[in-house]
Image (cartoon, rainbow, N blue to C red):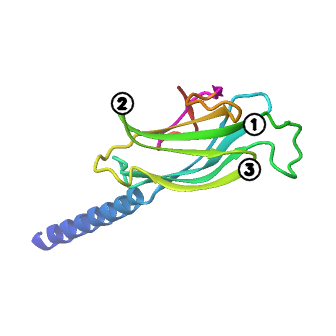
Amino acid sequence: MTRAFLRAATALAAALLATTVMAGSATASPISQRFSVPSGDTCTYGYTEGVLEWRSAAPTVAVRLTGVVVDRPIANEPIACRDDRRYTIATYVAYAGEIPIDRAAQRVDNAALRLDFVLGSNTSVAGIDRVVIQVCRASLDRPSAAPDYCGREYTFRPVSIGPIGS
């Protein structure tokens, strides 16, 4: 009876260890999520798109962002948007609850700019639960801190399939 008990206990311990190792490796792998955010105008002069890579298991400590931010018109692109003398600014803000943890902004005029950066890498605060992305357009003709207009904010969470409008 003791031998049967030891075999059962050993089998149970092996199963628990295997489950723990598998769960640990599953949570350690990053969660990749596509994003696409427009400027909100009829010609889609500006937009950003790419992939958010949520690093680490919850609470997420950093989010890598790769992709592109675009301002139209671009040379040799078949689109009927005339140059409106504005540039595009895309902003990316990582939050932990209601607190902004990290932010980045990319500006481009009549071109496409590649993105590759990490939000949250320079902070000791863990718990990034969402990234909010917004694309705005600002005039080249008048210097101002405020954009002329912005598309709506898009909120991305590591567990959702797509954006959640704010």
68 with respect to 15 (left or right):
right
For the question of whether residue 20 can be seen, the reply is yes
- Of 74 and 9, nearer the camera is 74
| Residue 38 place in picture, x, y as percent | 68, 35
23 with respect to 108 (left or right):
left
Q: Residues within 10 Å of mark 1 (few under 14, many from 20)?
A: many
Ranked by sequence position, the earlier of labels 1 and 3 is 1
Q: Which disc is residue 111 wearing?
A: 3
Which residue carries the number 2 mark?
Answer: 98
Ranked by sequence position, the earlier of labels 2 and 3 is 2
| Mark in front: 2 vs 1 | 1
The residues bearing labels 1 and 3 have C-alpha atoms spaced at a distance of 11 Å
Q: Residue at x 17, y 70 (%)?
A: 4
Q: Residue at x 54, y 39 (%)?
A: 91
Quarter the N terminus occupies: bottom left
For the question of whether residue 161 can be seen, the reply is no
In magenta, the rendered stretch is 148-157
The residues bearing labels 2 and 3 have C-alpha atoms spaced at a distance of 34 Å
Rendered view: 166 above or below 125: above
Which residue carries the number 1 mark?
Answer: 45
Q: Residues within 10 Å of mark 2 (few under 14, many from 20)?
A: few
Kind of residue indicated by mark 3: Ala
| Residue 152 place in picture, x, y as percent | 60, 27
Q: Residue at x 85, y 36 (%)?
A: 81
| Residue 123 place in picture, x, y as percent | 32, 50
